[in-house]
Each structure stands twice: as C-alpha cells, then as structure tokens.
Image: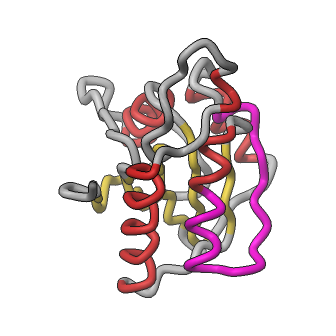
Amino acid sequence: MPLRLDLLRHGDAVPAGTGDDAARTLSDRGRKAVAWLAQEFVRRRWKPTLVFTSPLRRARETASILIEATAPGLTCEVLDELLPEHEPEELVEALRAYDPRGHVVLVGHQPLLGRLASHLTGDADSEFRLPAAGLLSLACAHPLGTGCAALELELYPDGVT
C-alpha cells in the first residue's frame, strides 16, 4: 500500500510572552484556520489512518481538530522527534518503527517540517516554508528515505481570519 504523508504545521498560536513555549495554545485565528483545513479534508474525502503530533500543546490541539472532523476516534501518537530541534533523519527513523502505510499526517513545526519535505523529495535546493496551518502532501515510496517522495499538493488557509 503506498504512503501519502501530509506535513501539517500547527495553527497560529498565542504569543509566547513570559510563559512556557510548550504550553502555548492555538489563537482564535489558529483554530479557525485549522478548522478550515479540516473541512478541506472532509470536502476531499481524506481520512487519515495515522496521525502523529509533536508534544507541544499547539500541535496537539491542531491534531485534535483535524481528527475530530475527519476520523473521530482515531488515536493520535505523540512523537518527540516532531519537535522543531530534531533532524529529518531522526524523524524518519522514528516513523520507520511504525511502518506507516495509507494516509499519515504529521503535525509539527518549522523548520523541521520544511527540512523534512526537502529530505524526502531529495530536493536539497528547495526550502519549503510552511505558514501556520499550512500543509504539504507527499506521495511516498516504501521505505521512507531521501528522495522517496514527490510533492503532490500544497494547502494554505489564505484569507482565514
């Protein structure tokens, strides 16, 4: 079974201020943008089979909104390798342990997701920059590794306020 891998950056979050960055929640704008994206999944009849998220609160909230709209009851796995300071190779190695198939969504952060897209497409010259609630959809060959993927679609919640 081929793998469709969606790289989804968390929605816009409240400013960090003096609080803990890991505890930052989605802003109202961020929730609306992620809800718009979730409705795009519904409109396109996309149903994720696996969802992985960073442990940071804004990423977990993003994953929850997506799952609620597209695959209620689906369990979301938290992967530390989706934290922004990790390297794409570390994330790929963690994903290989799950032997992902079907439609997998990774909810995380920049710059990791952009670097992961470059790694998987084998296009080191491209710098993928995902805005908040932006999505890159990749068609991947098995097994995951450098150059295994082709970029199929980019979705951005333009105009969502």
Say which quarter of the image contains residue 39: bottom left
- Compared to residue 23, the image places residue 138 above or below, namely below
Which residue extends farthest left? 159
Total marks shown come to 0
Nearer to the camera, 72 or 143: 72
Q: Residue at x 70, y 31 (%)?
A: 23
- Asked whether residue 61 appears in the rendered view, the answer is yes
Say which quarter of the image contains residue 34: bottom left
**Horizontally, is 31 left or right of 98 in the view?**
left
Task: State yes or no: residue 79 in magenta.
Answer: yes
**How is the structure coloured here?**
secondary structure
**Horizontally, is 157 left or right of 113 in the view?**
left
Which quadrant is the C terminus positioned in? bottom left
Residue 87: image x %, image y %?
Answer: 59, 22
**Horizontally, is 142 left or right of 13 in the view?**
right
Residue 4: image x %, image y %?
Answer: 49, 65
- Compared to residue 121, the image places residue 99 above or below, namely below
Q: Residue at x 58, y 65 (%)?
A: 65
- Compared to residue 123, the image places residue 75 above or below, namely below
What stretch of residues is rendered in magenta?
63-82
Which quadrant is the N terminus positioned in? bottom right
Q: Residue at x 32, y 39 (%)?
A: 131
**Horizontally, is 15 left or right of 71 in the view?**
left
Nearer to the camera, 65 or 110: 65
